[in-house]
Amino acid sequence: MKIVVLAGGLSTERDVSLTSGAGICRTLLANGHQAVLMDAFMGIPYDADKLDELFSLPDAGLSIASGISADEPDLAAIRASRPDQSPCLLGPNVIALCQMADIVFMGLHGDIGENGKLQATFDVLGIKYTGPNSLGSALAMDKGLTKQIFRTEGVPTPKGTWLYKSCRDTSLAALGLSLPVVVKPCSGGSSVGVYIVHTEDEYQQAIEASFCYEDELIIEEYIKGREFAVGIIEGKALPVIEIIPNSGFFDYKNKYQDGCTQEICPAQIPEDIAHKMQSAAEKAFAALKLDVYSRADFLLTENGDIYCLEVNSLPGMTPASLLPKEAGAAGINYSELCEMIIEKSLARYNKTV
């Protein structure tokens, strides 16, 4: 099978995405597929009449993945480095090569990879891809919409609201909240631009910093608790995993730097709590109209209350990422997980109307 593993992109999570994509691509090659790793933003400048050769590249494009830095990438510098300087978010030959593939494995995280726009583009062009559909991706990416849907569907979530840049001077009291609170971009990922604040000064600094990423923020009550995640495949929850940062919370550094976090799966929590979390994850998955797979993030308080923070429509897929670890606890190894995602994604296109 010819497979393009699409990763990178112009996102604060591009390093994570490229690392995920490289792991996926190596696995697919080992499984006998003709796979090539492509950076969605940089593309591959190549003779349009010879694009089929890219599926037989000696390194399968893996040289574009160079690991995850402790700091988020400089997107302005990355944009400036693209030779064609096109305003298009897709680089040279991305669409053409994807049209030649039997399926595109979506190794993207954040921005265009998870907001549904690329999925919608592929739908229009008849390109098959892995992971959730365009509507589910768009709903899950917008944390404001997610919170409203959770409230309507009975998925427990922290009290909160959204704040637009034009209304940045609105007080916490006017928003119906009080300190401490969490400030985060509405459509961000990997905890970039997320701040836990305890004072008014910290709050003002946090909203200014978060508004550097986008013009809409989520302001929600701070819930003190242990951190968990629940992967979902075709609507069914995997074993719960607990995330224990050595310090602070599960931020960008703690997510991706070795030795910063302990991860325990299955989580050492009472069975009834685990079932409650899994049930909420399945309900969130259905409420957001997701399909194929995703991962829901949770907090658990000392008194046993659970809160769903968000659902990641394209969770990390490095062998050390949360979803593969949960799948492993369910008896599904990394190679089998990649093949399962492809199989279940292709099934979407084989349904009769």
Image (tube, rainbow, N blue to C red):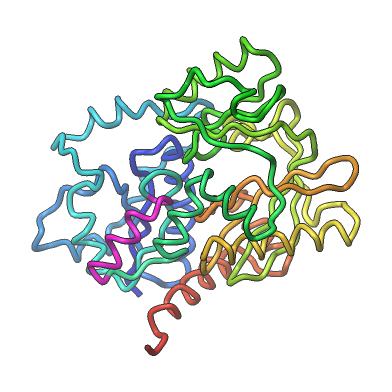
One can see residue 198 in this view: yes
Question: Quadrant of the image for the N terminus?
Answer: bottom left
Task: Look at the picture and state if 200 lies above or below 57.
Answer: above
Number of marks in picture: 0
Q: How far from the left and from the top, in percent, is residue 338?
A: 52, 66
Task: Look at the picture and state if 101 lies above or below 229.
Answer: below
What is the chief secondary structure element of the magenta stretch? helix
- Choose top left, top right, bottom left or bottom right for residue 317: bottom right
Q: How far from the left and from the top, in percent, is residue 260?
A: 69, 32
Q: Which residues are magenta?
A: 113-126
One can see residue 29 in this view: no
Question: Quadrant of the image for the C terminus?
Answer: bottom left
- Whether residue 84 sits left or right of residue 123 in the image: it is left
Q: Nearer the viewer, residue 282 or 345?
A: 282
Task: Look at the picture and state if 127 lies above or below 310.
Answer: below
123 inside magenta stretch = yes
Q: Nearer the viewer, residue 27 or 103?
A: 103
Q: How far from the left and from the top, in percent, is residue 318?
A: 55, 51
Furthest residue toward bottom: 352
Furthest residue toward front: 174
- Whether residue 166 sits left or right of residue 311 in the image: it is left
Task: Look at the picture and state if 92 lies above or below 183.
Answer: below
Q: How far from the left and from the top, in percent, is residue 114?
A: 43, 51
* Residue drawn where x is 25% and y is 67% of the image: 124
Q: Nearer the viewer, residue 77 or 175?
A: 175
* Residue drawn where x is 81% and y is 53% of the image: 267
- Whether residue 275 sits left or right of residue 253 in the image: it is right
